[in-house]
């Protein structure tokens, strides 16, 4: 599952708001008139009509952009974040349906438990957020998108757990160890070759199980962070500048957690 953690950062939101404001009809059409006026001036020389089109188009385009960016920028930014959040939500629902099936097949109880915990903690965060902020606010959609990112990253880790468990599901560690014990004292080239292959399978099994434990631990950290952020959100008075800054710091910590997880996954 792929998503851009920078999508909910202020710099990205500002850039998207600027792009949207520049492509609105009230900005675009006057700019086109101004461009045509400028082109006509270059081709035919300065004239009343061409100069009027150039200057008038430029002035109207600037005014239109100012209106879209400064007056309606908040609405544009909120719609951008809401679209991004809904795209994450769609990915999440698809991933949950897939994981429920795959993890049940593997009898991966620990993974299923984590899946349920992510669902529960996400719902709690959402409930607290609904009581603290209006759903039409930019901050609301930013925070909810952040929680979606944490949830998706956890699901991505559980997908890794599923793949690791499936890859070694045909390796019976107990049976291999028992066979190795029975071969103790057997001294032949064939026996040594067999022992080498059996140890290789054990090593592969242990490597994958270590990866599973690592992914579980990573998810536990994310679950704890979600609890902490939910509690901080519940205690935040958004009319207080300092409290709001503390909440923003908590959001940054969660984003950093996700980014570190993605970087680690890429290295692996």
Image (tube, helix red, strand yellow):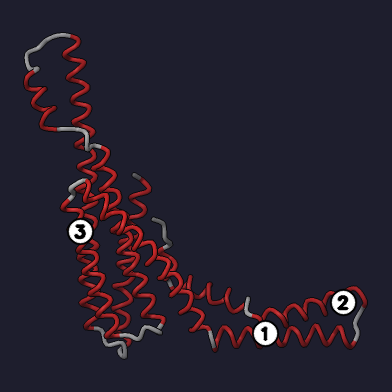
Disc 2 is placed on an element classified as: helix
Tag 3 residue: 114
Q: What is the secondary structure assignment of the residue under circle 3?
A: helix
Q: How many marks?
A: 3
Horizontal relation, residue 34 to residue 137: left or right:
right
Mark 1 neighbour class, 10 Å CA radius: few under 14, some 14 to 19, many 20 or more: some
**Callouts 2 and 3 close, C-beta under 8 Å:** no
Figure quadrant of residue 193: top left
Asked if the residue at tag 1 contacts the one at tag 2, i.e. Cβ–Cβ closer than 8 Å, the answer is no
State the residue position of label 2. Answer: 40
Q: Report the disc number at residue 143.
A: none
The x and y percentages for residue 213 are 19, 48
Q: Residue at x 38, y 75 (%)?
A: 142
Dot 2 or dot 1, earlier in sequence: 2
Check the image and report above or below for 185 versus 43. above
Q: Residues within 10 Å of mark 2 (few under 14, many from 20)?
A: some
Q: Quadrant of residue 219?
A: bottom left
Image quarter in which the C terminus is found: top left
Q: Residue 150 at what x, y percent from top left?
A: 31, 64
Alpha-carbon span between mark 3 and mark 1 = 52 Å
Whether 136 is drawn above or below 195: the answer is: below
Depicted 97 relative to depicted 238: above or below: above
Query: Can you give x and y, in whole percent of width and height, for residue 253 in the image?
Result: 30, 67
Instruction: Give the residue at x 75% y 77%.
Output: 32
Alpha carbon separation for disc pair 2 and 1: 20 Å
The residue singled out by tag 1 in the image is 62
> SS at mark 1?
helix
> Mark 3, mark 1: which one is toward the viewer?
3
N-terminal-most mark, 3 or 1: 1
In which quadrant is the N terminus drawn?
bottom left
Depth check, front residue: 156 or 244: 156
């Amino acid at each position: 599952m792929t998503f851009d953690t920078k999508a909910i950062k202020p710099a990205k939101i500002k850039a998207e708001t600027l792009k949207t404001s520049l492509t609105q009809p009230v900005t675009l059409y006057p700019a086109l008139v101004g461009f045509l006026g400028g082109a006509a001036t270059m081709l035919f020389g300065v004239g009343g009509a061409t100069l009027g089109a150039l200057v008038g188009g430029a002035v109207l385009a600037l005014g239109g952009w100012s209106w879209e960016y400064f007056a309606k920028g908040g609405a544009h930014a909120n719609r951008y974040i809401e679209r991004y959040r809904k795209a994450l939500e769609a990915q999440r629902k698809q991933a949950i349906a897939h994981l429920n099936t795959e993890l049940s097949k593997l009898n991966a109880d620990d993974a299923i438990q984590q899946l349920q915990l992510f669902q529960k903690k996400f719902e709690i965060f959402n409930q607290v957020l609904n009581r603290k902020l209006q759903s039409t606010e930019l901050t609301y959609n930013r925070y909810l998108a952040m929680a979606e990112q944490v949830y998706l990253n956890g699901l991505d880790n559980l997908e890794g757990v599923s793949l690791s468990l499936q890859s070694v599901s045909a390796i019976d560690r107990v049976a291999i160890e028992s066979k190795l014990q029975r071969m103790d004292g057997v001294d032949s080239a064939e026996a040594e070759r067999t022992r080498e292959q059996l140890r290789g399978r054990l090593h592969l099994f242990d490597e994958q199980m270590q990866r599973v434990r690592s992914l579980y631990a990573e998810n536990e950290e994310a679950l704890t962070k979600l609890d902490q952020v939910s509690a901080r959100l519940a205690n935040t008075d958004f009319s207080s500048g300092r409290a709001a800054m503390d909440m923003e710091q908590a959001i940054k910590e969660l984003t950093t957690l996700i980014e570190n997880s993605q970087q680690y996954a890429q290295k692996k």
